[in-house]
Amino acid sequence: MDGLIFDGDANFRHIFESIRSAGKRREWLELALSLRQGNVMARIVLAASFASVLVKPCGSLPFFVHLWGGESGTGKTVALMLAASVWGNPEMGRYIQTFNSTVVGREKLAAFLNHLPLIVDELQLARDGRGKLNFDVYALAEGVGRTRGNKSGGVDQTPTWQNCILTSGETPITGASSGAGAVNRVIEIECRTAHRIIEDGHATAGVLRKNYGFAGREFVEKLYQEDNAQLAAELYKKHFRALSENDTTEKQAMAAAVILTADELATDWLFQDGNAVTVQEISGFLASRAAVSSGRRGYEYFCDWAAQNANRLRQDNEQGDVYGVISGAQVCIIRKVFNQVAEEAGFSPAALLSYLKEENLIETRGRAMTCSRRINGVRTECVCLRVDTGEITADDDLF
């Protein structure tokens, strides 16, 4: 609306002022249509930007779309500019922010944007002096900030948001030790030089800097006309059912369903090119149930660890500490060693043992999670992993 005066926190004035229209709608639309003719990655990123305002109407949860790739020139930052141009000025430092910020700052920014997408570039800026990633997906994916006290003895209002978070970086935003909930909330897209997400990044960025802010306004105006919000909810349920039939989790299906719904509506209302993202196309970017399971990843981690430390899992080892013993198709790890390795890798020993027992991947004694084994003549409690010792076949990769 005209004549609106910003009367909020001065730190967010530049964000508020960046959400506006500039340039020519036709030029932005022509660029968007040409990019939608390319690879599916650009279409997913653009659709995720629209999807942010559908998170609440569809009853979904906040989610991440993360672009990553170790090579430069794959178009990750320009793709974020495309997403930002839906709503406002895509210049870095205007609508788009970087990970060179604090947890509190990101929470407050997400709460300020509320339903509009939070777009953050350069994940590597969140690493500490030792190169460890200092960023927790849960901090934003839950949609609720930390409750904090104030000087008067009360508590500040807890920040909340319901949106999509678009990020980029040189590495994935989740790792082997990330919790299942974190992996669940992230759709990760790897960008490579051979398959750039944006082919001509320089020219694309030039057009986006001059023309932006039309599509988002039109999409929201259309969304709240007649029964279109109800239409969006029905489309979401249809896509969610279709995605749930695949080998993916419920939360991954929820995020993908919001993206598909947004792209279908944007195709009908704005682009009219019949080039909406399909269930089959987006399914290739969703994590499988096994990949999401932190228990399965923990089991695979210990299988790799056992192979790496085979010499220390021998009773005749005379060159260092003994971690346990390999006995046939079992790797028996001293309980104290198991706990220490699990914690260092970021897994909860208790949760991991519960999963392993449920999946019959460890031998147990009664209600205990361990078995008694004699190591170097001393009886001790061990976690006895069942491992695959079958013969290598022609289908196995040999290095």
Image (tube, grey):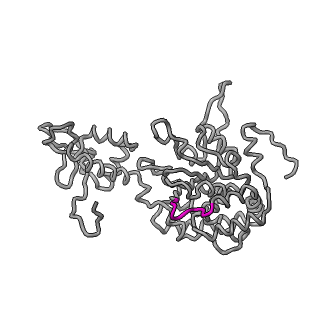
In this picture, is 90 found above or below 274?
Answer: above
Residue at (65, 44) in percent of width and height: 160
Q: Position of residue 12 (x, y in %)?
A: 72, 41
Q: Mainly helix, strand or loop, the magenta region?
A: loop
Q: Position of residue 82 (x, y in %)?
A: 66, 58
What residue range appears in magenta?
191-200
- Front-most of 347 and 42? 42
Q: Position of residue 55 (x, y in %)?
A: 64, 56
Asked if residue 182 shows in the view, the reply is no
Asked if residue 122 shows in the view, the reply is yes
Residue at (63, 66) in percent of width and height: 261
- Which of the 4 image quadrants contains residue 39? bottom right
Say which quadrant the C terminus sits in. bottom left
Residue at (61, 44) in percent of width and height: 98
- Which of the 4 image quadrants contains residue 81? bottom right
- Front-most of 82 and 153? 82
- Image check: 338 left or right of 201? left
Q: Position of residue 161 (x, y in %)?
A: 65, 47
Number of marks drawn: 0
Q: Magenta stretch: residue 198 in it?
A: yes
Q: Residue furthest right?
A: 3
In this picture, is 6 found above or below 279?
Answer: above
- Image check: 362 left or right of 155? left
- Which of the 4 image quadrants contains residue 279? bottom right
Q: Residue furthest top?
A: 152
